[in-house]
Amino acid sequence: MTTTTITVGSVSAARGSQRWVSCQVIGGMLLVQTIASGMLLLSKVILNGGTFVFALLTYRHVVAALCVAPFAFFLERSPEIKSKLRCWPVWFWLFINAITGLTLALSLYYYGLRDTTATYAVNFLNLIPIVTFALSIILRIETLGLNTSAGKIKTIGAILCVAGALTACLYKGKTFHLFPHNHRLSDAISAANHAGYNNESVANDHHNPGSGSSSWVGGTLMLTGSCVSYATWYIVQVKVRELFPYKCWATMLTCFLSAVQSLAVGACVDRSPRAWELGWNLQLVTILYSGAMASAATFWLISWAVAKRGPTFPPMFNPLTLVFVPILSALLLGEQLSVGALLGMVIILVGLYSFLLGKAKEMKLKRQLEGSDDERPNSAGGDPEAGLGGAVAMTSRPGNC
């Protein structure tokens, strides 16, 4: 009787511990999405204030590299790192990794965000897994797999996401405010953004988005180009992972290289000191926030969640930005919402969850097959994340490093 009581108590304690860990992981992923939403809104505010995009990227990636550096130096101590860094192919692919995933993708996204709204731009972030899937099909890295239920669910999800994006782009409908517009709050945010400028004209030097529909079309093209660049980045990461399988070091070096690239491009575009100066305003807050929270904290939280729940768990929370960003932008920035934008968000939300569900089923089946064939000499090596089919490429928020 005593033994039975002890066994039941142990099982109950184990279940309680598992529930507590699950709550912690879910809370961590909710925090990641909150950080990402805050990053998007802060970026929108300072870009509207006239911040030079390439100056922002340069400072942001310097801070990000410094914040990720402790993870690299203390968590990844391997004698092979120095030898690998002496090989030029490693630096070449890290350089390409920085261009596609940070410099090009973020600059296009920031210009698109400046010319549209945060609510509209966040739709394109959630289309990146779909664009990546389409590119991998074109490059024959993946197959549609329409003969399996997972393949059908993935394809239906991809079609729904494209339909949602087209709906948000082409159909506007009635516009409305989600909350009564608080002009005092918006004015306070704007004043905080401009407080550190020595000359008020700086706020307008790099903010010439045009007018009306032409600005919106240009912003949409920029956001679309950013999606393609991010999708290319995920494919490039497969090669980077083969040559240099040290995530912290790769992240730090990629951020550093992107800072150099952004500095070089920015110097060609605008060399005036005013474009590069920093003041005690939201621009400085955004740069520090992006490095400390959107890079280092997010990197650690996602890595921890992957270790606890696997690589398919963090992406399941990414669509929550479709909910967080419209609410926060309507509350803090007074942005209008349209029926078309909301309808497109809902369709993208359903499509993305369908796609991720199909992806999770596909990975589960792949692990089962690899587990049954792990004794064969020509097996895949027991690494379900070795190819693009692994969801590791989609576990990190784009632009968070």
Image: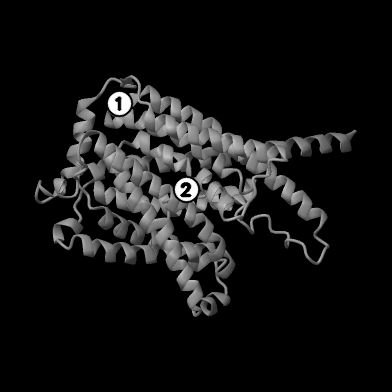
**Res. 20 visible in picture:** no
Q: Nearer the viewer, residue 35 or 373?
A: 373
Residue 153 placement (x, y as % from top left): 64, 36
* Residue that sits furthest to the right in the current view: 1
Query: Is residue 92 found left or right of 144 in the rendered image?
Result: left
User: In the drawing, what numbered circle is on residue 398?
Assistant: none
Q: Which residue is mark 1?
A: 336
User: Do labels 2 and 1 touch, CB within 8 Å?
Assistant: no
Which image quadrant is residue 140 in? Answer: bottom right
Q: Nearer the viewer, residue 188 or 4?
A: 188
Q: Secondary structure at mark 1?
A: loop
Residue 312 placement (x, y as % from top left): 61, 45
* Rendered residue at 36%/31% (across/down): 328
Q: Secondary structure at mark 2?
A: loop
Q: Amino acid at mark 2?
A: Arg
Q: What is the basis of the colouring in this image?
A: one colour
How far apart marks 2 and 1 lie (CA) works out to 26 Å
Residue 342 placement (x, y as % from top left): 42, 26
Q: Residues within 10 Å of mark 2 (few under 14, many from 20)?
A: many
* Quarter the C terminus occupies: bottom left
Question: Does 86 sit above or below residue 357?
Answer: below
Label 2 vs 1, first from the N-terminus: 1
Query: Is residue 272 found left or right of 293 in the rendered image?
Result: left
Q: Which residue is mark 2?
A: 397
* Quarter the N terminus occupies: top right
Query: Is residue 33 found left or right of 274 in the rendered image?
Result: right
Q: Amino acid at mark 1?
A: Gln
Which image quadrant is residue 166 in? Answer: top left
**Res. 64 visible in picture:** yes
Residue 336 placement (x, y as % from top left): 30, 26
* Rendered residue at 21%/60% (across/down): 269
